[in-house]
């Protein structure tokens, strides 16, 4: 998998999953009115700074930790969401719940988890 193309594909899937989760939270009353609207889903490139920041955060994890994949997936989801919605998203009371739910959904799908593992390895190996 090409790291840039792989991140873009996974980000599209993440945007779709995030849209579905946020809409579900809104219907259930879990997201306050006035919360920033979702970005339009489209073929947008991944900012180099996002790739670099994610690679730095992944390098800080212990690669032999049995929970590495789960932690790396959570870092990935959190990094992408903050990149998409801004730093203020972290202060939203439901943000970590959304990160946890989206990361768990992505980790539960074997093909997605395998693609993420490959992506994480390539980011750690190739990003400055």
Image (cartoon, rainbow, N blue to C red):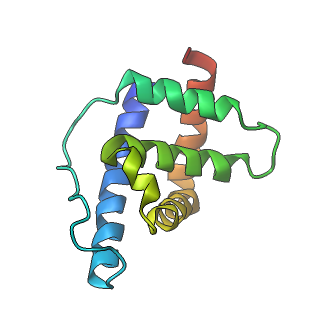
The residue shown at (21%, 37%) is 43
Q: Position of residue 38 (x, y in %)?
A: 23, 56
Q: In this picture, is 63 found above or below 35?
A: above
Q: Position of residue 106 (x, y in %)?
A: 50, 57
The residue shown at (82%, 39%) is 64
Whether residue 16 is visible, yes or no, is: yes
Q: Nearer the viewer, residue 121 or 72?
A: 72
Whether residue 2 is visible, yes or no, is: no
- Residue 26 lies left or right of residue 3; in this view the side is left
The residue shown at (75%, 52%) is 67
The residue shown at (52%, 62%) is 96
- Residue 91 lies left or right of residue 46; in this view the side is right
Total numbered labels: 0
Q: Position of residue 114 (x, y in %)?
A: 58, 46
Q: Nearer the viewer, residue 110 or 84?
A: 84
Q: In this picture, is 39 found above or below 30?
A: above
State the image quarter where residue 23 is shown.
bottom left
> Which part of the image, by quadrant, shows the C terminus?
top right
- Residue 110 lies left or right of residue 62; in this view the side is left
Q: In this picture, is 38 found above or below 30?
A: above
Q: Nearer the viewer, residue 92 or 122?
A: 92
């Amino acid at each position: 998998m090409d790291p840039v193309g792989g991140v873009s594909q996974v980000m599209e899937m993440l945007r779709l999953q995030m849209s579905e989760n946020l809409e579900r939270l809104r219907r259930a009353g879990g997201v306050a009115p006035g919360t920033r609207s979702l970005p339009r889903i489209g073929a947008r490139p991944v900012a180099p700074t996002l790739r670099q920041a994610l690679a730095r955060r992944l390098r800080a994890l212990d690669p032999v930790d049995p929970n590495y994949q789960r932690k790396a997936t959570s870092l990935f989801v959190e990094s992408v969401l903050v990149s998409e919605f801004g730093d203020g998203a972290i202060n939203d009371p439901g943000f970590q719940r959304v990160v946890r739910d989206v990361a768990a959904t992505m980790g539960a799908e074997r093909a997605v988890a395998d693609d993420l593992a490959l992506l994480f390895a390539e980011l750690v190996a190739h990003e400055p």
